[in-house]
Amino acid sequence: MRRRIVVLAVLAAILATSLFGVPLAIGAASYYVSDEKNELEVLADTVAITLSADLVQGQRPDTLPETESETTLGLYDATGTRTLGRGPDTADDLVTAALAGTTTRGTTGGDLVVAVPVSEDRAVIAVVRAATPRSQVYGRTLTTWLIMAGLAMAAVAFTWVVARRQAARLSAPLEALAGAADALGVGDFGARTEPSGIAEIDIAGRSLNRTAHRLDALLTRERAFSADASHQLRTPLTGLRLHLETAQDPSGSAEQTAQAIQAALTGVDRLERTIDDLLSLTRRPQEGQPLEVPGLLDQIRAGWHAPLAAQGRPLRLRPEPDLPATVAAPAAVRQILAVLLDNALRHGRGAVTVTVRDAGEILAIDIDDEGAGLNDPIAPERVPPAGPHGRGLDLARSLAEGEGGRLICQPGSALFTLLLPAHPGQGETVQDENGPHDIGDIGDTGHPIPRGRRLR
């Protein structure tokens, strides 16, 4: 690229110099020819005026004025015969034209010639002829052309130097852009470009930096999602394995074996739903669909009534009337609630209550049980290492934020609340017993679940 910039700049300088210099050189040559003829005409006029008094009186001059070594003067009579000085013996075309009474200028052979008539009462009595070799004009013209060529070469050389500097200045940030793009291509999403001071290149650099940031964030989310998804799949697989091992136990009765097989089939259905939900979240085909609360509660009852009943614990579903409509991916909401219900099943006690309510134009889904609560709030900057349960909660929190909502825990209780805005976007408010709160900052009524938070 640098070479192309330099070559184009030098070619442009040569073209500009030629377009300006060639006409100027031709004009200079014409000027020197015209100037030389003017000098010859002045010389011939001066001689004609000097000799006119003698010629009018019929006296023949003895000599002509001295001139430069290469300039000649000649005096011709009315018949065209040279009577004094140097020049052709008889009148040439220019002298013949001057005998007609007009000053003539032209070129004869290799000389520049001017012929001036000497008149008496409108009659030409003589002609003064002045001539000089064209070589004198050629010498002056050549000298001027050499000076112009030197200046043109200096201009082209200066252009070459400036072009090299500008090429380096322009190509360096572009090479940095290419290097950053190559780094992105091999997976280094931390590659960034620095401002160069060139607006167009800086625009491309900022776009590349934003792309690198988005790719980095996307890859981070994909890795986290993969780890979280593996956790979501591991739980039903573990339950399925336990039921199959129970069915395989030869000491069990036929009724126990049938119950274990049925539980395994239920686990297979749950695993299939989980896989479908995870694939749906990856492809996001349901994004923008209204959330159907009755169908969601039916799925909760079908999936979690039996596991809780096996522990002698009831499942209570309490939907309030006139719930606000919300737009969220059903698969995301199912996975969030699956994480919270699994937490209640594994670590809680007593009845599990799922309440769906209106929190001031915000749809709130509360999941509570009768077990011990979270006594000490955990700040996000003091997060313990992520464990197997924290991994699931991390997925739930990420999915909630991805739908424009929040997942919070109430300090001192086993209550977890999923908040979904009626219309996705920032600036929504939550109305509860403590007044309205921005959905992006609801720490007054609950604590956002930090990443890696291990449940009870």
Image (cartoon, rainbow, N blue to C red):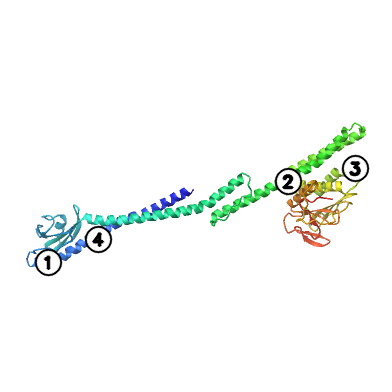
Front-lying residue, 198 or 296? 198
Q: Amino acid at mark 4?
A: Asp
**Residues at circles 1 and 4 in contact by the CB criterion of under 8 Å:** no
Q: Amino acid at mark 3?
A: Ala
Residue 52 disc label = 1
Along the polypeptide, which appears first: circle 1 or circle 2? Answer: 1
Q: Amino acid at mark 1?
A: Ser
Identify residue for label 3.
310
Q: Secondary structure at mark 2?
A: helix
Q: Quadrant of residue 125?
A: bottom left
Find the distance from the CA under tag 4 to the CA under tag 2.
Answer: 90 Å
Along the polypeptide, which appears first: circle 1 or circle 3? Answer: 1
Front-lying residue, 115 or 235? 235
Residue 147, position as x, y percentages in the image = 32, 57
Along the polypeptide, which appears first: circle 3 or circle 2? Answer: 2
Q: Give neighbour class at mark 1: few <14, some 14-19, many 20+ (Cα, 10 Å).
A: many
Q: Is residue 404 left or right of residue 135?
A: right
Q: Secondary structure at mark 4?
A: helix
Point out the frontmost of discs 1 and 2. Answer: 2
Find the distance from the CA under tag 1 to the CA under tag 2.
Answer: 115 Å
Identify residue for label 2.
225
Q: Residue at x 42, y 51 (%)?
A: 10
Along the polypeptide, which appears first: circle 4 or circle 3? Answer: 4
Q: Residue at x 16, y 56 (%)?
A: 94
Point out the frontmost of discs 1 and 3. Answer: 3
Residue 199, position as x, y percentages in the image = 54, 56
Q: Residue at x 28, y 56 (%)?
A: 143
Q: Give neighbour class at mark 4: few <14, some 14-19, many 20+ (Cα, 10 Å).
A: few
Identify residue for label 4.
35
